[in-house]
Amino acid sequence: MQSVTTSQDGEILVLSVNNPPVNALSWHVRQGISDGIEQGLKDDSVKAIVIRCEGQTFIAGADITEFGKPPQGPDFNAVLNTIETATKPVIAAIHGTALGGGLETTLVCHYRIAVPSAMLGVPEVKLGLLPGAGGTQRLPRLVGIEQAAVMTSLGEPISAQKALDTGLIDKLAGEDSLAADAVAFARECVAKGPRHTRDLPVKGDTSIIAKLEAENARKWKGFDAPYANLRCVAAAAENPNIEDGLKFERTEFLKLMSGSQSAAQRHMFFAERQAAKIDGLPKDTKLRDIKKVGVIGAGTMGGGITMNFLQKGIPVTIVEMVQENLDRGVGVIRKNYEASAAKGRYTSEQVEKMMGLLTPSLNLEDLADCDLVIEAVYESMDVKKEVFGKLDKICKQGAILASNTSYLDVNEIAASTSRPQDVLGMHFFSPANVMKLLEVVRGDKTADDVLATAMAIGKKIGKIAVVAGVCHGFIGNRMLSQRQIPANALLMEGASPEQIDNVFTDFGFPMGPFQMADLAGMDIGWHRDTSLEPTNVREAMCLAGRFGQKNGKGFYDYDEKRNRTPSPEALAIIEDFRSRSNMQKREISDQEIIERCLYPMVNEGYLILEEGKAQRASDIDVVWIYGYGWPVYRGGPMFWGDLEGAKKIVESLERQGVKVAESLKAKAA
Ligand code: 3HC
């Protein structure tokens, strides 16, 4: 099948792009468009040319799979030049999404028409790039500096109506009559002749750029691409001759394209989509119908999990053991929704509608008609087994029984029921209504359709779901513990919590291990027996009443606004514990902190893969980026490990005395 076909409607030549699934600009599409334009220019009976697309969308961008491969077919800029310099009007007819190179294609067309539901944007920044085929120079000439700066640096698409209002498109078509309306519009354009975006003056004021940089300073920390996008938009304002701006854009684009940040972000684009795929399971596996959900436990996790479903219009029965806890849990859910409503995210009617879908209960029997029950009770195997034993008797046949356990053996939990095929883990991350990651833990006996349904419902509630196998801590927490052990050891050897945390935040994590401990609360799992000698620093902190952010003192001291400062008392506790352990304090370099804390995580990732507990390395990257704040521009631990180099990592791990995964050794060889 040809990826670009031509047809003629009177004096209008129509080029139809057909390159499923998203009409990306693969080399054969570029070739087809170029040939089609040439054909239209040669044929005297053709007076104007329409470029439109088959399928669900207009061109959604360059073909990202071609990046980094030897070039094939005509260069994209040459194709754009062919369109732009055409002596007959070329009209873009847009539906679905015109993104990136797709939008850049429309910018060199002489006129643009779109259906009202179309979305138009330049999301390259999310791939660590910028619209490098003239997008940063032509967009400001149509929509002005302000709008172009926002669109390029944030990467969010705008609606067709907004595109019309800002001058990005010329006309709205009927929602169902784009083909005919575009041809009619093309006829109107014949008399007007070609009109060139490049000849328009740049409108607007560059002061928006400093404003955007200030507003997004936190979000963009460590990222190169947002700033490069803004530099290019500024260059459009500074260079009346577009050729100068295009040259500047090219240099900036090539810098990003050859850098590791874009490689990492492109890796994550595909990793995220790949994670949804379950190896060995046919795509058309019949899913179980999830119309009603039960959640056991109205604490922080249970409440957060519940909110995800209510937001998608799925009724939830939430069960607690004590009325007071139930009321508190329901109250927190309401308070969270009301806070979002105050920020304009919901109307009060929407809040009431969501709350109306919630049935609080003190009785497990009320879960009898639920299609999916998620247990989020205390992390104890005995408690979980008891709950699942009861669910087995109460729940209807075919219901999926999920545990939100973060560490425990899902097979053992499943064995406490007579239907282990219906049991799996659904491990949410706190706060569960916010964090994107969902680890779906596949037990030995979990049925295929149960796994596929849990993955699909995860997607429905806006999560990025990853399949994990049963092992202590699954993918994420298992690797986290490999980071925590050396972080604690480094403290004993002489590093301060602040030095270690700063290495992590400089790396791009939102917080380091000791900030995280303070946030989570150090007394979790502490036995509170004050007569016992502390066996680690954490216990020593608890004994001194330093529980973390919750009481304003942990590894750091906190003010009422939870701003942290280094704590002399905490440092003295560490010092004291160090000398009682007969440890000698020494200088520790930031590089050592990276190698000791992060290399063992990479190693653990390889072990997880060797044991078949993750389907693929990129799933591990997804877990760490969406669940633990690994910076996306570093591509996750496995991608980063490859950049560091297996040989360097293995040598360092051997120096540290860590047992190295065979597959990592093989890679290093
Ligand atoms: N190149 C190659 N493959 C692409 C692609 C692209 N630009 N965009 C999407 N795909 C693939 C996906 O990997 C996925 O493949 P799979 O089915 O094998 O997993 C398939 O198309 C469907 O994609 P989604 O699952 O994302 O489908 P949705 O319907 O949910 O979303 C979309 C469609 C909104 C178009 C979304 O895919 C998207 O945002 N795509 C990326 C758009 C983009 O970033 N464009 C800019 C590219 S860079 C560029 O143009 C550089 C230029 O300035 C020089």
Image (tube, grey):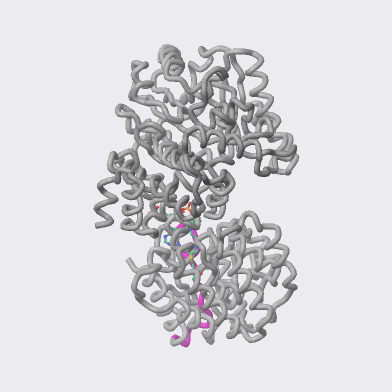
518 left or right, relative to 421: right
Quadrant of res 343: top right
Residue 296: image x %, image y %?
53, 21
Q: At 61% from the left edge and 60% from the top edge, which residue is drawn?
A: 154
Of residues 418 and 218, which is closer to you in this image? 218
Residue 50 visible in the snapshot: yes
Of residues 215 and 482, which is closer to you in this image? 482
106 left or right, relative to 653: right
Q: At 69% from the left edge and 81% from the top edge, which residue is drawn?
A: 201
Of residues 438 and 54, which is closer to you in this image? 438
Quadrant of res 483: top left
Q: At 46% from the left edge and 81% from the top edge, which residue is drawn?
A: 78
Residue 525: image x %, image y %?
52, 24
- Residue 44 belongs to the span the image colors magenta: yes
Magenta part, dominant SS: loop
Q: Over which residues does the magenta segment extend?
A: 43-59
